[in-house]
Amino acid sequence: MIRQAALLAAAALLALAAAPADAAWTIEHVTVIDGTGAAARPDMTVVVDGERIARVVPTAIAGPAAGKVIDGRGKYLIPGMMDVHIHLAGWKGKKPDGTPIVDHAVAEAALASYIYDGFTTVVDVGNQPENSLERAGKIQSPRIFATGNLITYPGSHGDAMAIRISDFEKDKALLDKHIAEQQPDIVKLTYDEEGWGARPMITLMPEPLLHQIIQYYNEHGIRTTVHVSNERRSIEAIYAGTDTLAHPVIQGPVSDSFVKLMAAKKTPFATTLTIGENYSRLVEHPEFLDTPDYVTSFSAADREEMKTKLRETWKARPWTWWMKIMTPICEENVRKIVAAGGVAALGTDQSSGPAAHREMELLVQAGLTPAQVIKIATHNGAVFLGKADDMGSVEEGKLADLVLLTADPLKDIDNTRAIALVMKNGQPIDESALPLAGGPVKRRLAP
């Protein structure tokens, strides 16, 4: 017992010596759910120094608190969540002379809804470059990684918002221009002949061209993601060298061999369940728009339009009902791959914080545990971006993107909405200053 006490005393002295004197924030007595899938650790102290997490230690050996102190008793600390597949709202097209029309207020409100809901990172995987707002972080928003324009073959999926490449050698200058002018953080290619659901067949990018483009961007140090929707094209994209997949397989049940491939290759893929489920949900259960997170994130006028005009439009579309049938199949595909050891990262294919929380609900509905979903929404998002060494978990040296919760998310994934504090880059977010579409809100926790 004496030896144990001496060791604890020595550890406490070492911890005190290691504490940064000018630490910005200390969160004491908090339960840490670090995002890696490790077990929750109660009564921990997390010290933030500048933009990064300086220490994560048991409170019993943490020593005197440094900097500003937050009492974490009865609270839970998780990494800032990530949505790795959004299309930021705000693009309105172009004038006859080609001048882009962007509603920056709409874009900023969408970003505000993400940071308000605890999503400190988003990946905009297909947009006009004029609408990829504030990648330099000049406003309170999530950190933004962006592809800018898509890359695709003429007539292929999404070519209205794409740089069209038909011949690699002849069109290489277009790729160079994309890299130089848009400086993409990640590049999205589309590889889908469609012909599924209510969609007619369209032109497919030739597989050798897909390989050449992926290799070219990788040679420039840029990761790639590929839009796919079926197993065959997913396999071809993986062997063409893509770093990630922009969607799960939704056209039908995955084979056992594909599940094994995804587990062996560890190719991260975005989950994007809510984009398909969203159509029938609005038609059958429009009352979800009256829940607090949607009321905060959307204006009353927009919610009313969704309940009426948009609802009637979606009700009449065969696509709505095809997606309702296929979403459970897609959920099972995701569950199987995750169970086998594949890497899923949370993505919505939408543009709001509430949609990202709905994605988490659907993942639990698919049969995943809340602990698995938290990892998918945090650490795996960083893996998707190739930045797991720098972000995505509550670990020493990582960027201090953190969410403090008042209820245990391991018991109920909806408790990720029970937010007391959001921190990005080591600085608490002041919710009262966010340009939320639903109107101003009070600050949840004023340290």
Image (spheres, rainbow, N blue to C red):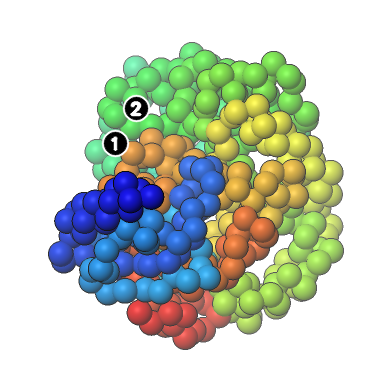
Local SS, label 1? helix
Residue at (56% x, 50% y) in the render: 374
Residue at (55% x, 33% y) in the render: 343
Sequence-first tag of 2 and 1: 1
Residue 301 percent across, percent down from the top left:
63, 80
Q: Nearer the viewer, residue 28 or 185?
A: 28
Q: Quadrant of residue 294?
A: bottom right
The numbered mark at residue 404 is: none
Residue at label 1? 179
Residue 446 percent across, percent down from the top left:
38, 82
Identity, as a three-letter code, of the amino acid under mark 2: Tyr
Above or below, 360 against 340 in this view is below
Q: Mark 2, mark 1: which one is toward the viewer?
A: 2
Local SS, label 2? helix
Residue 382 in view in this figure: yes
Residue 431 percent across, percent down from the top left:
43, 77
Above or below, 203 against 291 in this view is above
Residue at (36% x, 67% y) in the render: 27
Residue at (29% x, 22% y) in the render: 219
Residue 155 in view in this figure: no
Left or right of 312 on screen, residue 376: left
Tell me the quarter of the image containing the C terminus.
Answer: bottom left
Mark 2 touches mark 1? (CB < 8 Å): yes
Residue at label 2? 217
Q: Nearer the viewer, residue 71 or 222?
A: 71
Q: Quadrant of residue 270?
A: top right
Q: How many C-alpha atoms fall within 10 Å of the one at disc 1: few (<14), some, or many (≥20)?
A: some
Left or right of 290 on screen, residue 221: left
Identity, as a three-letter code, of the amino acid under mark 1: Ile
Residue 12 percent across, percent down from the top left:
27, 56
The CA distance from mark 2 to mark 1 is 8 Å
Q: How many C-alpha atoms fall within 10 Å of the one at disc 2: few (<14), some, or many (≥20)?
A: some
